[in-house]
């Protein structure tokens, strides 16, 4: 995706407005498509509403699983109907395209140029957190405790929820460190006791994929 100046498209959870990328696959028998892997988004506030967006060139990645019984040299037509919104600060335009990629099954070797091209886009994806986070809700206040080494740098923090219809996206957030935890506090619209998915954005568009369940929140610590 390569937005024109002044335009943007959306992350998996667009925030207060917008439409994310939607894909409808038409795949050969036995071929399956994984979920959309999206790069770390920016945040944009317009008229008090917050959106999770991309203003610069970016890529969404999807893993395709190919059945084991296909033969080298066999052709597979990968087809997908894609829909998304292209928006400026004042107007949104629905867009779409049918994309067709004719693939030829190879021997598993990957050319260096292709490897480098995909590695570049993978570098913009959030890194999966290898430990579970936890959260607590007190009225409209939510605190999310995220395992994070106390020796690691933490600056310009913002929790971007993928789970929809819970958070007040534009509400202020604060963060503190206590031991090997980062605790990010924001606001919610309603009570909730399920799992919360999202990402912790920090530094220069870096991110950690976070999965949080209800649990005790560490006390104390220093503000970040």
Image: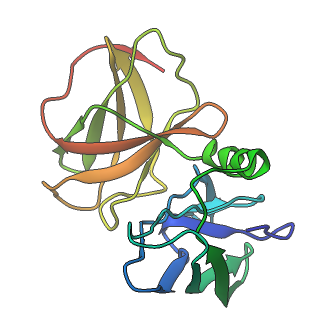
- Residue 133 vertical position relative to residue 51 in the rendered view, above or below: above
**Residue 224 horizontal/vertical position (percent):** 48, 21
- Residue 77 vertical position relative to residue 185 in the rendered view, above or below: below
Name the foreground residue: 198 vs 91. Answer: 198
Can you see residue 79? yes
Decide if residue 147 is on the left or right side of residue 97. Answer: left
Q: Residue at x 73, y 79 (%)?
A: 90
Decide if residue 121 is on the left or right side of residue 212. Answer: right
Decide if residue 61 is on the left or right side of residue 111. Answer: left
**Residue 83 horizontal/vertical position (percent):** 59, 85
- Residue 75 vertical position relative to residue 45 in the rendered view, above or below: below
**Residue 164 horizontal/vertical position (percent):** 34, 66
Query: In the figure, residue 218 lies in which quadrant?
Result: top left
Q: Residue at x 47, y 44 (%)?
A: 172
Can you see residue 47? no
Name the foreground residue: 83 vs 68. Answer: 68
Q: Residue at x 73, y 50 (%)?
A: 111
- Residue 198 vertical position relative to residue 103 in the rendered view, above or below: above
The residue most toward the right is 5
Q: Quadrant of the N terminus?
A: bottom right
**Residue 39 horizontal/vertical position (percent):** 59, 53
Query: In the figure, residue 73 lies in which quadrant?
Result: bottom right
Query: In the figure, residue 209 lies in which quadrant?
Result: top left
């Amino acid at each position: 995706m390569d937005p024109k100046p002044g335009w943007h498209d959306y992350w998996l959870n667009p925030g207060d407005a917008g439409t994310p990328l939607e894909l409808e696959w038409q795949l050969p028998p036995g071929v399956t498509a994984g979920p959309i892997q999206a790069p770390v988004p920016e945040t944009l506030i317009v008229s008090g509403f917050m959106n999770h967006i991309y203003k610069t060139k970016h890529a969404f990645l999807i893993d395709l699983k190919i059945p084991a019984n296909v033969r080298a040299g066999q052709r597979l037509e990968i087809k997908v109907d894609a829909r998304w919104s292209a928006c400026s600060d004042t107007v949104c335009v629905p867009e779409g395209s049918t994309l067709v990629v004719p693939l030829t099954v190879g021997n598993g070797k990957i050319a260096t140029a292709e490897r480098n091209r995909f590695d570049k886009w993978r570098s913009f994806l959030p890194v999966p957190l290898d430990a579970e986070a936890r959260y607590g809700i007190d009225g409209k206040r939510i605190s999310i405790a995220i395992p994070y080494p106390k020796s690691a740098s933490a600056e310009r923090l913002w929790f971007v929820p993928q789970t929809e219809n819970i958070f007040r996206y534009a509400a202020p957030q604060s963060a503190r460190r206590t031991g090997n935890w980062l605790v990010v506090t924001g606001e919610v619209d309603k009570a909730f006791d399920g799992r919360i998915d999202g990402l912790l954005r920090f530094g220069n568009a870096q991110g950690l994929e976070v999965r949080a369940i209800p649990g005790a929140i560490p006390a104390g610590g220093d503000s970040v």
